[in-house]
Image (tube, rainbow, N blue to C red):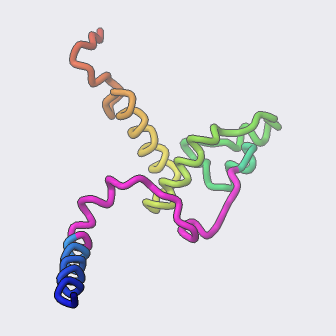
Amino acid sequence: MSYLLYSVSFFALVIATILYLTRTHWQPLLPNLPVPGRDYIYSRLPSSFTGDMEAGLSSSTFDLSGNVESGDSRAGLDDRSKAEILKIMKKRRMKFDDARRVYMENRFKANGIGPDGRPLDPKAVTFS
C-alpha cells in the first residue's frame, strides 16, 4: 500500500514540476479567472469628462479639457473601452497614449484590419 502512495506522490511531484517549468507556454491560454485579492483596489470608472481627466484618460494628443471648459454634459468616454485602456495602462505600465494605441491595434486585429489601417483580407480592393 505504501508503494502505491509513494508512486502517486512521486508522479504528482513530477507533473507539478513540469507544469511549473512550462507555465509560460500554457498560462496565457487559460481564461482570466477572477481571483479574490488580485485587484485589491476597486475604482469606479469615471462617468464624466472631468472624471476621465482625473483618471488619467487625457493627454496633449487626446485633450478633454475643451469638453470640460465648455461644460459638456455628456457621460464621458465609452465605459468598456475606458476599462480596457485602464487595464492596459495598469498591466503594462504604459501612459495613456501608448495604451490607447495598443487598444486600437487590438481592435483592428480583431476586426481584420492591419496596423496601418488597411484591410487584411486578400480579396479587398482599395483605390489610392
Place of residue 17 in the rendered image (x, y in percent of width and height, measured from the top left): 22, 77
Q: Which residues are magenta?
A: 19-45
Left or right: 77 as drawn, with respect to 39: right
Classify residue 117 by image quadrant: top left
Tell me the quadrant of the picture where the C terminus can be found. top left
Q: Nearer the viewer, residue 28 or 43?
A: 28
Q: Is residue 18 above or below residue 54?
A: below
SS assignment for the magenta stretch, majority: loop
Q: Tell me which residue sits at (19%, 83%) in the image.
A: 4
Q: Tell me which residue sits at (66%, 63%) in the image.
A: 42
- Residue furthest to the front in view is 1
Left or right: 9 as drawn, with respect to 77: left
Q: Tell me which residue sits at (26%, 20%) in the image.
A: 121
Magenta segment includes 47: no
Place of residue 16 in the rendered image (x, y in percent of width and height, measured from the top left): 25, 75
Tally of marks: 0
Place of residue 69 in the rendered image (x, y in percent of width and height, measured from the top left): 78, 41
Classify residue 119 by image quadrant: top left
Q: Nearer the viewer, residue 52 or 60?
A: 52
Q: Tell me which residue sits at (27%, 13%) in the image.
A: 124
Q: Nearer the viewer, residue 124 or 73?
A: 124
Left or right: 102 as drawn, with respect to 65: left
Q: Is residue 16 above or below residue 80?
A: below
Magenta segment includes 41: yes
Q: Is residue 2 above or below residue 27?
A: below
Tell me the quadrant of the picture where the N terminus can be found. bottom left
Classify residue 63 by image quadrant: top right
Q: Is residue 2 above or below residue 77?
A: below
Q: Nearer the viewer, residue 42 or 27?
A: 27
Place of residue 68 in the rendered image (x, y in percent of width and height, measured from the top left): 76, 42
